[in-house]
Amino acid sequence: MSLVPRQETHSKIDAAYATLEERITSGRWEIGEVIPREGELAAELGCSRDTVSKAIARLVHAGLVERRTRAGTRVLRNTPLAAGGSGSAPVPAVELDAFAFIFPSKRHEGVRRVMNGFQDAADEAGRRVMMLSTGADYQKEAEFITRLQEFDVKGAVIYPALAKPEDILSLSQMLLASRYPIVLAEVNLPGFGRPAIVVDGFHAGYTMTKYLIGKGAKKIGFVSNYSWTTTMRDKYQGYHRALQEAGLPEPAKGVMMDPGMHPNFSDPLAEPTQIGRHYLAGGTDADAVVCADDYLAAGLATAARETGRRIPEDIKLGSLNECLTGHPFTSYRVPYEQMGREAFTLLDAVQQNPQSLPVSGEKQLQGAIIERTSA
């Protein structure tokens, strides 16, 4: 049965367009999904392939899909067309001509510092910016990315809130679907066509471990959560290399790499403290521990005090990411302000000339050890 009335050609195209548009706006075809081939749609709708091709061309013009040679037609967005539209692209609700910075929460010291660097660079360049906080709600992050056009945003820096591996797939689909210049901060997804500014995790792990060795530690452990990410892998590899060079083994039960990551901006130390208790309950004899960040160092310090262990006399602690203020931990200070500045500069360059830089790539920033009393 034909889903497209067999009337004159213009009406057939309108009917095919309406059917395909409804499948997109209703969510039947999701953002990032490749829709069926034109021949399949023509057979299903009971019309010619030429009619389907023209209907899809209108979807492209409306900004709902994009056509890619050999890759097919992919859904870009699922928001309705502007009222009165005859296939024209929607008019932005607010004309800002801005760059956006999308982030989980400025309660996180590192995020706040990246945001400050981004804002400072934008002020110096005379560029208007939008700051969009998502909290720990990954779906809100997805919504912001898909609705950038409504605010006349020209591009975005995204500090992703990736709590679990499945979130990478969703983010990857959105990055492939988005037509806007996007730069990633702190996280890189190689192969998805978006440049990234990240910390050199290997350098962080290696440098802190060498520092603890220099302080006389012989049994140095390693604790992280979020262990499925490339950044944590790199931190562990740096730690392991430093031990190898010093001829030191990993201590018995001294390495704990928890895959979990459940952001709680109201009580950010709850999960790290549980991890610290679990680590010490395992019976490790480590005399020093490299912690992936300040939160884990704080959690481990709390757990150590509960068991009567002193910091640094019994266990030395080093953090690979300074993200708390007013703490006693020897930390690897990541240049987050520089990360924000360079993310803005890179986004501005890509927006002005998309061909001026590789469509993907990673710039790594190195930090330095800040000595305090935990080691």
Image: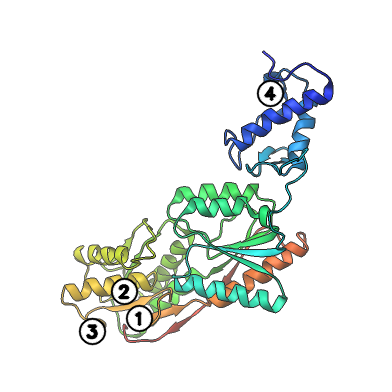
Seen at 22% across and 71% down, the residue is 303
> Mark on residue 313?
3
CA separation, marks 2 and 3? 16 Å
The kind of residue on which mark 1 rests is Phe
Q: Farthest residue to the left: give it.
A: 308
Packing grade of label 4 (10 A; few <14, some 14-19, many >=20) is few
Q: Farthest residue to the front: give it.
A: 84
CA separation, marks 3 and 4? 71 Å
Q: How many marks?
A: 4
Packing grade of label 1 (10 A; few <14, some 14-19, many >=20) is many
The kind of residue on which mark 3 rests is Glu
Seen at 63% across and 36% down, the residue is 24
Q: Disc 4 marks which residue?
A: 40
Report whether 351 appears left or right of 158: right
Seen at 68% across and 59% down, the residue is 153
Of circles 3 and 4, the one toward us is: 4
* Mark 4 element type: helix
Q: Earlier in the sequence, mark 4 or mark 2?
A: 4
* Mark 2 element type: helix
Q: Disc 1 marks which residue?
A: 329
Q: Disc 2 marks which residue?
A: 298
Q: Of residues 7 and 236, which is closer to you in this image?
A: 7
Among the 4 quarters of the image, the one containing residue 232 = bottom left
Q: Earlier in the sequence, mark 3 or mark 1?
A: 3
